[in-house]
Amino acid sequence: DQQVKQNSPSLSVQEGRISILNCDYTNSMFDYFLWYKKYPAEGPTFLISISSIKDKNEDGRFTVFLNKSAKHLSLHIVPSQPGDSAVYFCAASGDWGSNYKLTFGKGTLLTVNP
Amino acid sequence: NAGVTQTPKFQVLKTGQSMTLQCAQDMNHEYMSWYRQDPGMGLRLIHYSVGAGITDQGEVPNGYNVSRSTTEDFPLRLLSAAPSQTSVYFCASSYSGTSYGYTFGSGTRLTVV
């Protein structure tokens, strides 16, 4: 049973517009959430995170929103740039009382068109 | 700083062969992990370590062994390679768990024939 779900395998947006990537989770024990970006033939790169005690975290063009009651989080990228084209993974931790094991979603391929 | 270094980058093995995937970090991170990425599956945790001498199993540990004799190194051993172990393997390290984010290596692409 998949505990972190990214239901959109791909997303295409125009340069300058907003990109919204979604993630749902089923395990209520998760208390920390992260987004990673991955380019082909490279390892994932940490992008932004949020603790379950917050509902929003911003870092430049990237904002993550957390809705605990809905077990849903989203990553907003504004404005989107062609260099943002990559696979984005949502990840969660806190299960089993640990903060060092990450459970990943399957990823969403974002394509930003010039 | 080199960050997290994985070797080799590519490897082809025959079924039944054994090998070790190397992982080294120079950031003095206590936490280290191994993940595998398969098409349509995201990344899945194989084994992890919270410090030298301490390791534990993740979600998909079967067929793999690890050890952590130093803070810097966390090798992953395939005991008897099987085609199902064809995957891309990522090593990651963190200072103190997920609140600091994990730094990933560039990966090892393994093919078992």
Image (cartoon, coloured by chain):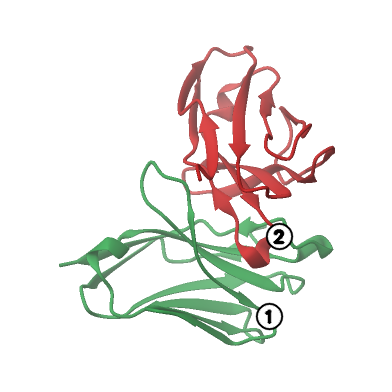
Q: Which residue is tagged 2? A: B97
Label 2: state its secondary structure: loop
Classify B61 as above or below A8: above
Residue plotted at (25% across, 80% down)? A17
Q: Position of residue B102 (x, y in %)?
A: 60, 56
Task: Give the answer, above or below, for where B43 lies relative to A6.
Answer: above
Q: Residue at x 65, y 84 (%)?
A: A68
Q: Chain of mark 1?
A: A
Q: Amino acid at mark 2?
A: Gly
Numbered disc in front, either 2 or 1 = 2
Of the chain colours in the picture, the one used for chain A is green
Please indicate whether residue B41 sits to the left or right of residue A61 in the image: right
Quote the CA–CA distance across marks 2 and 1. Answer: 15 Å
Label 1 sits on residue = A52
| Image hue for chain B | red
Q: Position of residue A1 (x, y in %)?
A: 67, 57
Q: Is residue B90 left or right of residue A3?
A: left
Asked if residue B108 is positioned above or below residue A76 in the image, the reply reads above
Residue A9 in sight: yes
Say if B54 sits above or below A26 in the image.
above
